[in-house]
Image: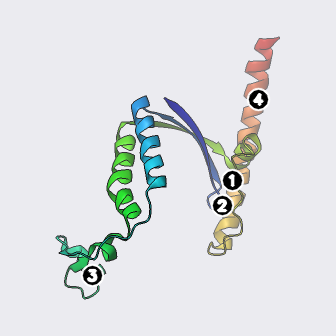
Amino acid sequence: MRRWYVGFNNYWFISNIFLEEMPVILCFLEWLSGIICYFIPSIKLPKIKFKLKDKEDWDFTDKGDGWTDLRAWYGDLNQLWHAFICISVSNLINKYSKIKTINLPFNFAKEEFPNEYIDTDDDDDLEDVNINRNRKISNQLDKEFRDVYYKLDYNYLRKRRN
């Protein structure tokens, strides 16, 4: 099965078109795990104590000794399902899917795919200096791309049609 995606990055001003190919059974498995994940109720887990095996995780416990309970560590049934099933299914899908990428200039892709573009320019945590520099570089690349694109379109595609 094939799926197409268009992605935009408003910080680097780049855009990509992705073609994802995967077996149909994995699409069904992804859909099924998503439906189950959506309908699992948020039932809190019991406070059964257990000790974490990985010592790197001990810093995240209350006393730092590695002892915690199911509710403090996993939260609820929905989060437990997500941690063990949804992530495993996603890893399986990523393992067997092939993704091909086409890079396009930001402004060109924004004009060609206006329904896919979501404006998020109101991010206050980004540095304005870098954004302005990235926007300037993107505009230069867009101009160069359009020049070549229109030349190729005129010289090869339109002449052959006539």
N-terminal of the two: label 1 or label 3?
3
Residue 134, picture quadrant: bottom right
- Image spot of residue 84 (x, y percent): 32, 56
Which quadrant holds residue 18?
top right
Q: Position of residue 42 (x, y in %)?
A: 44, 65
Discs 3, 2 touching: Cβ within 8 Å: no
Mark 2 — residue?
Answer: 134
> Distance from label 4 to label 3 (Cα)?
60 Å
Badge 2 vs badge 1, beta-carbon distance below 8 Å = yes
Which tag, 4 or 1, sits closer to the chain's start?
A: 1
Residue linked to disc 4: 151
- Identify the mark at residue 59; answer none if there is no mark: 3
Q: Earlier in the sequence, mark 4 or mark 2?
A: 2
| Direction from residue 55 to residue 44 in the image, left or right | right
Where is 29 relative to 45, above or below? above
Whether the residues at callouts 1 and 3 have beta carbons within 8 Å, the answer is: no
Verify CB contact (< 8 Å) between mark 4 and mark 2. Answer: no
Q: Amino acid at mark 3?
A: Asp
Label 4's element?
A: helix
